[in-house]
Image (cartoon, helix red, strand yellow):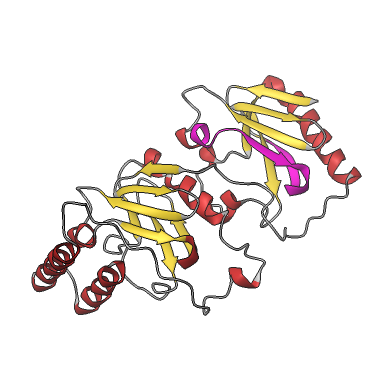
Amino acid sequence: MAEIIQRDGTWAFDGGTVRITPGLHRSVPLFRQTYGEIAVPLEAVSSVVLEPERRHGRLRLRLREGADPLLQATGGRLPDAADPYRLTVDADRTAVAEYVAEEIRRALLLDRIPKEPAKAYLLPGPPVPVSVRSSDGTVSFDGTRVRIDWADTSERVKRATGPRIITMGDLVQVEWLPNSGHEDGLLRFVTRETVFSKLPPEKDPYALDLWGSARRDLLTALVATAVTARLPHPSTDAGHDTSAHRPLPAPAVPPASEHHDDVLLRRLRELGRLHRDGVLTDEEFAMTKAVVLRGF
């Protein structure tokens, strides 16, 4: 067993798996603590390096392309501090870190792990159900469908459409950009019907506009990853084909106290007011109205 324990976290390698456990210190980002322990099979590893820095070192595990749904969903856009595959190493522990790295390299050679892109995800992603409250609303995923419940601060056009429910059968891909604190982020669920939509995230009823706490909004990557892990792998034809028909999303269920037609008419009237007030352009009104009608 090769192991290094740091305030930033712990890496342990048993010859077949690199087990990464985040540290509990307050300096460890909320995202890493929430994502929890990651067991990386050796076959998912491409390389490992120890990068020297001025006052400390940094262990970095590089994974094979297509092996990890987290890296697929976030596209390398996770902030460095939130990246679970990096470990800050104290200056007096660099020798231990190099030993761990060398053991992983030796195993990669002995087991002849290929460097080519993986044909399937080799890590499972976060467990479900998973639910995250963001600045634009709460997004939940139970393994079969995504649900978005809008916040009071969401744009009126989104609140007018009501809760959004999207089945896995209708999803094409997930788009995620972090809220950097300087620029807004987004979590968008692209379906067969919205693949060519040009609505901005603040008006798109299939997207969360991430504009609040960058620390908390980063947790939406958990949902993005969990959904990505259950979509067709990018290496398959299904992962690229967007022309085949899939079922429409399951309709949002209105409260039991409200009649179906009343809910629909109220939301359509609200959209009409937004259109007349100039909040929605003609194109945005038509697209959002279609979303509401499909939901019912």
**Residue 110 percent coordinates (x, y):** 91, 43
Q: Which residue extends farthest top?
A: 92
Query: In the displayed structure, does residue 235 sit left or right of residue 96?
Result: left
> Observer-nearest residue: 248 or 175?
248
Residue at position x 42%, y 47% in the image? 220
Start-end of magenta stretch: 32-51
Residue at position x 23%, y 53% in the image? 154
**Residue 287 percent coordinates (x, y):** 28, 75
> Observer-nearest residue: 261 or 10?
261
Task: Look at the image and say whether residue 33 sits in the magenta stretch.
Answer: yes
Count numbered badges in the picture. 0
Above or below, 25 against 86 in this view is above
Query: In the displayed structure, does residue 128 sit left or right of residue 71?
Result: left
Look at the image and tell me in which quarter the C terminus lies.
bottom left
Q: Is residue 104 shown to the viewer in this render?
A: yes
Query: In the displayed structure, does residue 84 sit left or right of residue 166?
Result: right
Above or below, 271 against 216 in this view is below
Residue at position x 33%, y 40% in the image? 213
**Residue 166 percent coordinates (x, y):** 40, 61
Task: Look at the image and say whether residue 36 sits in the magenta stretch.
Answer: yes
Above or below, 193 against 76 in this view is below
Look at the image and tell me in which quarter the N terminus lies.
top right
**Residue 165 percent coordinates (x, y):** 36, 58
Q: Is residue 171 shown to the viewer in this render?
A: no
